[in-house]
Image (cartoon, rainbow, N blue to C red):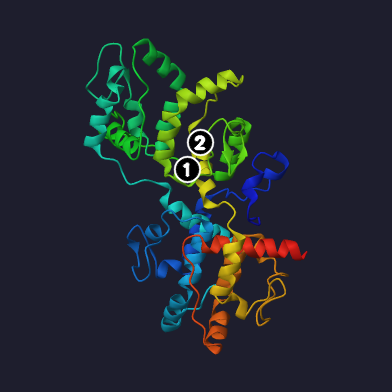
Amino acid sequence: MIFTYGILISLGASEESETYPFPEDPLKGRKLFVSKGCIKCHSIWGVGDPLGPDLAQMSKKQNLLQLAGLLWSHSPKMIEIMQERGVTRPTFTPQEMGDLMGYVYYFNYFDQPGNFIEGEKLFLEKGCAECHFVGENGGKDKISLDDYGKYISPSFLATGLWNHSPEILSGMNRQGLKQPEFKGQELAHLLAYLRGAAINQNGEIIYAEPGSPKRGQDIFKQNKCNMCHAVWDKGGRKASDLGRRELRLPLTEIAGKLWSHSGHMWEEMKKIGLSFPVFSPKEMADLISFLYFIQFYDEEGDPKEGKKLFREKTCIFCHALEGEGENVGPDLGESEAHFSPIFLASAMWNHAVVMEDMLEEKDLAWPRFSGNEMRDLVSYIKKATEISK
């Protein structure tokens, strides 16, 4: 599967969205992380060799092109360390680079564990105790939530909250109660309380498979979510654009937003004649995984800024584009790398040693990329290539 840059703009077109580059399994890159030797220098959440940066910390709030920029910027140091250790520098096909990048991006899908005491407070403050109880703190005519204590994945609680939200909200309206909202880690705290306080008679613990962004994309379309929600300006306008940066959130925060807006969404569905969708825990995990991976990509960059960067980062001293520049390296106007950030990241990594030698010969410093610079550069290369063809 080739990852294509800008493909998110086709969300509303069913025939095009089949080519969406969402991974089927975000954990597929784990094998590469080991087999390619990344684990020998990098830790994940403090686990592993601390020689290089902790990739879970480094990848926070980073999208694909930002990760590609970090990978490029750190290449000289990695080359040096590998040579010192006598390690053969690994190469990556575009597919392998896509799997590895997806795996690194997935590190921040899960939140930090919630706090039991905070969760207990929230159970009371959010009004949950009006209708529910946990453990031995029961009450007449109240519904037990003990069953949720055996689930490790937040997707089970998210499923229960969503599927029962019409019933829950109707009951709250009858009692004159407002729908509570969950922000930040509040849902994680509530889940920690449910796990700790629930009576689990047989000690059963249930885990869940990681959600599949690819299957979640299909669920998103099948349930007509894009009738109200756009992604990068493509889709409905009734609700928020899910490509916005402020929606780059981990699992329980996405689940919290789904619940917090469920009442409003239900009302809007009724207005346009849509039935309220019910999800299985697996489907909910897939859907949330898809929502999280939307942020793996980015909106189009600024080609004008990219053209400046092409000069400032000294790309022009080795590469030709728009009839300018030197032909020491490939003419980027004829390269396929611009079609995909994954293809570009793979090509840049695989040729880093050669490029470092060329830069030394020309007495040029190794260019580094930060923020959205890689995005703008790719947008310029893409636009320039399209014009030339």
Q: Is residue 387 visible?
A: yes
Front residue of this view, candidates 78 and 310: 310
Q: Earlier in the sequence, mark 2 or mark 1?
A: 1
Question: x%, y% of residue 313?
Answer: 54, 74
Q: Is residue 207 visible?
A: no
Q: Which mark is residue 155?
A: none
Question: x%, y% of residue 92?
Answer: 58, 68
Front residue of this view, candidates 284 and 342: 342
Q: Amino acid at mark 1?
A: Glu
C-alpha gap between disc 2 and disc 1: 8 Å
Question: x%, y% of residue 267?
Answer: 51, 20
Give the residue number, with chain letter if any, for mark 2. Answer: 282
Residue positioned 48% across, 44% down in the render: 210
Q: Secondary structure at mark 2?
A: helix
* Label 2–label 1 contact, CB within 8 A: yes
Quarter containing the N terminus:
bottom right
Number of residues whose C-alpha sits closer than 10 Å to that of mark 1, classed few (under 14), some (14–19) or many (20 or more): few
Quarter containing the C terminus:
bottom right
Residue positioned 64% across, 42% down in the render: 11
Q: Which mark is residue 209?
A: 1
Residue positioned 66% across, 57% down in the render: 2
197 displayed left or right of 28:
left
Q: Secondary structure at mark 1?
A: loop
Question: x%, y% of residue 89?
Answer: 51, 76
Q: Amino acid at mark 2?
A: Lys
